[in-house]
Image (cartoon, helix red, strand yellow):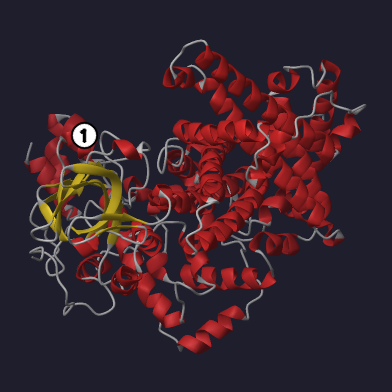
């Protein structure tokens, strides 16, 4: 028996879904660009021409570059272009990325101009229009999802595009689906003959997947699963693209066979018709309402009432229900968590690092243009970045952006190795991969969110303006601390892995590579003799290792003592959670410092890259010690006198890195259109741009203040106002006045 909403043929689809076609046609008429579309070029010719472009200009749209900003670039101690190539992974990758950016930003459909003045519905329609147009553009340019250009598209669009959960939908099927399911669903999804979403989070449960309440009961008579939302807390809530867009979704539900629960499993469920986009029988779905950001995403809710799907719609690469109801499992039960692991790793680069890099770019450029007060009597007002306090706000955030970029490379490499092993049905790396992805998702999102807020505050009143670009970066990155796993819970999952590994290491058993240091417990004191010693990676890396081991071992000891004293395991765990979170953070911080130092050591010495990266590595490490003095002093490993040395070296580094601050953010290579900031543009013409952008506000486009005219104007003035309105043919004002 087939679901009445399902379809096996796709007669109405060409390259895009029916929804895309309808919305694109409707929204194109409302496009604010009002410019002629870019003429189509030969796919091969245009692609080759763009790839031959080695560098593109971020030049001024207002005129010359602000002298205060230009002077900063003239004294760079390293090659900005070579550092950009390092961040991209090579000159070829830089060239491809810039070519993609050029294509995207030269197309008026992808314009973000006037975005700050758009309504939520306008943002959504624009995002859909971009998503549809992107498919056409990719076809025109010869780009594919497996091609080298694809990973740069999201950055070029600044994430301002619809159907982002479609990628998670596809990834879920690719990782959790059988070969047969992949061959059926992935081509349809790739061609956008359907739009996918990912329905995991519920009103009552988020990170704790075992507590999800949606049910899927297998009916052996009809060979179907019957999905239900048994109560309001089981309603799916927050899935992106669910509110208005998605036609299909991967639903995570508790599997029941013959009355027995087999835990959480993923199911492909069609929720909207492929003919007219109406909701399928048994489906209730809609938009969850306004949010702090992501206005262009239709986050939605989903209720299921006796929704039947065929047996083949349960993703079955690792788990399968046979026709007679026999449940067969292959591999680890935790494989269902692997999709979230991949999402957490990808969001670090896509949703977290980029906002911090952009915020640093905006705040640092602004800080060399903005002059305030006088450092020395009789001189002109100083650049605010020349003040040590401003350096201490911004430069550690800049160092963190580089540190986390390199740890992201580390995680990507680990993920690639882990995925290869999982494809071979070897799940040995899964616990370590889950622990690291969870811990770093929490640590990096928390650190970067705080960093963006610091950058915003460092820009004073102008930073509070939406036109600075900083408020939208902050409200967007803030969500990363919450979605795809609440940070405290993720840190506790990392801590559980650490405790287990510590106990194994103490018993002489082998442990995964990232935690072998737990077995090498070193007692003693920090050997530093002067402040220069704290610029040695060996010195500060060992200090971080010591702290991580101490926090893990002391928490493990407390946990054991509580259990041995008669406290139940779950109560003992709860009584240790604050310290467990500290241990998980210390573990991640140690790995980040160690990885940064090892990355710097491998860099070539030419072009000045290694030297400036060494300064940033030192600053990142010493800022962590300076900001967490108590943790390093706790057991006497570091003395008070040595902390004074740390402070001295830390403050010295601020002045050193300050000289290269602008070139260091220039190396991130964001175009003005990508930053979309009146404060952070390449030319530094801050005040003129703020004024010009303010003129675009709809409130500055009307000739009459309607609220004043219709609410506070004296009654005797109404005939005069009506006459003026008629003369100007202002229909809106005429209607407002005649309604009085």
Residue 503 in the image: above or below residue 691: above
Q: Give me the residue at 42% from left, 58% from top.
A: 113
Q: Give me the residue at 56% from left, 22% from top.
A: 579
Q: Picture coordinates of residue 671 (x, y %)?
A: 57, 60
Residue 115 in the image: above or below residue 489: below
Q: Picture coordinates of residue 622 (x, y %)?
A: 76, 33
Residue 224 in the image: above or below residue 261: below
Q: Inspect this view and state whether residue 35 appears.
A: no
Badge 1, how many Cα within 10 Å: few under 14, some, many 20+? Answer: some
Q: Which residue is mark 1?
A: 233
Q: Is residue 376 left or right of residue 586?
A: right
**In this orientation, which residue lies closer to the viewer: 172 or 497?**
497
Q: Is residue 9 left or right of residue 172?
A: left
**In this orientation, which residue lies closer to the viewer: 578 or 709?**
578
**In this orientation, which residue lies closer to the viewer: 364 or 590?**
590
Q: Residue furthest right?
A: 529
* SS category of the residue bearing label 1: helix
Q: Picture coordinates of residue 179 (x, y %)?
A: 35, 70
Q: Inspect this view and state whether residue 1 appears.
A: yes
Q: Picture coordinates of residue 162 (x, y %)?
A: 34, 59
How many numbered circles are shown? Answer: 1
Q: Report the quarter where the N terminus lies.
A: bottom left
Q: Report the quarter where the C terminus lies.
A: top left
Q: Is residue 682 left or right of residue 154?
A: right
Residue 43 in the image: above or below residue 528: below
Q: Residue furthest top?
A: 565
Q: Give me the residue at 56% from left, 73% from top.
A: 99
């Amino acid at each position: 028996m087939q679901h009445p909403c399902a379809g096996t043929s796709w007669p109405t689809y060409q390259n895009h879904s029916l929804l895309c076609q309808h919305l694109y046609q409707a929204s194109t008429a409302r496009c604010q660009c009002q410019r002629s579309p870019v003429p189509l070029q030969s796919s091969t010719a245009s692609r080759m021409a763009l790839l031959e472009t080695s560098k593109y200009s971020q030049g001024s749209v207002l005129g010359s570059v602000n002298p205060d900003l230009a002077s900063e670039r003239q004294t760079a101690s390293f090659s900005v272009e070579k550092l950009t190539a390092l961040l991209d992974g090579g000159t070829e990758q830089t060239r491809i990325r810039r070519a993609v950016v050029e294509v995207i930003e030269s197309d008026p459909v992808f314009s973000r101009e006037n975005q700050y003045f758009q309504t939520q519905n306008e943002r959504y329609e624009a995002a859909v229009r971009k998503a549809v147009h992107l498919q056409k553009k990719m076809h025109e340019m010869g780009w594919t999802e497996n091609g080298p250009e694809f990973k740069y598209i999201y950055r070029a669009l600044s994430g301002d595009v619809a159907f982002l959960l479609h990628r998670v939908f596809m990834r879920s099927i690719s990782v959790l689906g059988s070969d047969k399911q992949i061959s059926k669903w992935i081509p349809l999804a790739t061609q956008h003959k359907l739009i996918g979403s990912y329905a995991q989070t519920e009103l009552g449960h988020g990170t704790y997947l075992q507590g999800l309440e949606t049910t899927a009961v297998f009916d052996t008579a009809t060979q179907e699963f019957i999905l239900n939302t048994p109560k309001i807390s089981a309603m799916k809530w927050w899935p992106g693209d669910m509110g208005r867009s998605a036609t299909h979704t991967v639903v995570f539900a508790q599997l029941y066979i013959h009355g027995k629960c087999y835990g959480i499993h993923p199911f492909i469920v069609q929720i909207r018709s492929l003919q007219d986009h109406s909701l399928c029988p048994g489906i209730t779905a809609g938009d969850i309402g306004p949010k702090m950001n992501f206005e262009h995403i239709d986050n939605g809710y989903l209720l299921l009432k006796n929704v039947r799907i065929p047996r083949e719609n349960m993703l079955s690469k690792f788990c399968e229900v046979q026709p007679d109801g026999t449940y067969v499992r292959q591999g680890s039960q935790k494989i269902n968590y692997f999709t979230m692991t991949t999402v957490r790793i990808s969001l670090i680069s896509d949703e977290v690092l980029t906002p911090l890099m952009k915020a640093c770019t905006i705040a640092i450029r602004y800080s060399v243009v903005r002059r305030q007060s006088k450092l020395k009597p009789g001189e002109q007002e100083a650049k605010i970045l020349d003040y040590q306090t401003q350096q201490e706000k911004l430069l550690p955030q800049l160092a963190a952006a580089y540190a986390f970029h390199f740890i992201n490379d580390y995680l990507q490499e680990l993920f690639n190795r882990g995925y290869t092993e999982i494809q071979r049905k070897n799940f040995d790396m899964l616990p370590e991969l889950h622990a690291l992805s969870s811990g770093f998702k929490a640590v990096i999102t928390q650190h970067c969110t705080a960093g963006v807020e610091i950058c915003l505050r460092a820009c004073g009143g102008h930073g509070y303006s939406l036109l600075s670009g900083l408020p939208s970066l902050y409200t967007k990155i803030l969500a990363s601390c919450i979605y795809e796993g609440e940070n405290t819970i993720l840190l506790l999952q990392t801590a559980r892995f650490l405790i287990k590994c510590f106990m194994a290491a103490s018993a002489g058993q082998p442990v995964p590579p990232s935690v072998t240091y737990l077995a090498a417990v070193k007692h003693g004191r920090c050997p530093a003799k002067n402040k220069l010693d704290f610029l040695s990676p060996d010195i500060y890396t060992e200090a971080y290792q010591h702290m991580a081991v101490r926090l893990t071992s002391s928490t493990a000891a407390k946990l054991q003592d509580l259990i041995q004293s008669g406290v139940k395991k779950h109560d003992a765990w709860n009584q240790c959670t604050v310290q467990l979170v500290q241990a998980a953070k210390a573990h991640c911080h140690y790995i980040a410092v160690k990885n940064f130092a090892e990355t710097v050591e491998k860099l070539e010495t030419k072009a000045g890259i290694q030297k400036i990266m060494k300064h940033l590595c030192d600053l990142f490490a010493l800022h962590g010690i300076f900001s967490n003095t108590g943790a390093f002093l706790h057991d006497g490993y570091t003395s008070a006198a040595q902390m004074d040395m740390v402070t001295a070296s830390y403050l010295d580094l601020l002045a050193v890195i300050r000289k290269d601050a602008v070139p260091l953010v220039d190396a991130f290579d964001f175009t003005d259109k990508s930053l979309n900031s009146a404060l952070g543009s390449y030319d530094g013409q801050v005040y003129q741009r703020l004024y010009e952008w303010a003129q675009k506000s709809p409130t500055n486009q009307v000739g009459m203040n309607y609220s004043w005219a219709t609410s506070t104007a004296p009654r005797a003035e109404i005939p005069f106002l009506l006459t003026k309105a008629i003369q100007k043919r202002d229909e809106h004002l005429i209607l407002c006045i005649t309604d009085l």
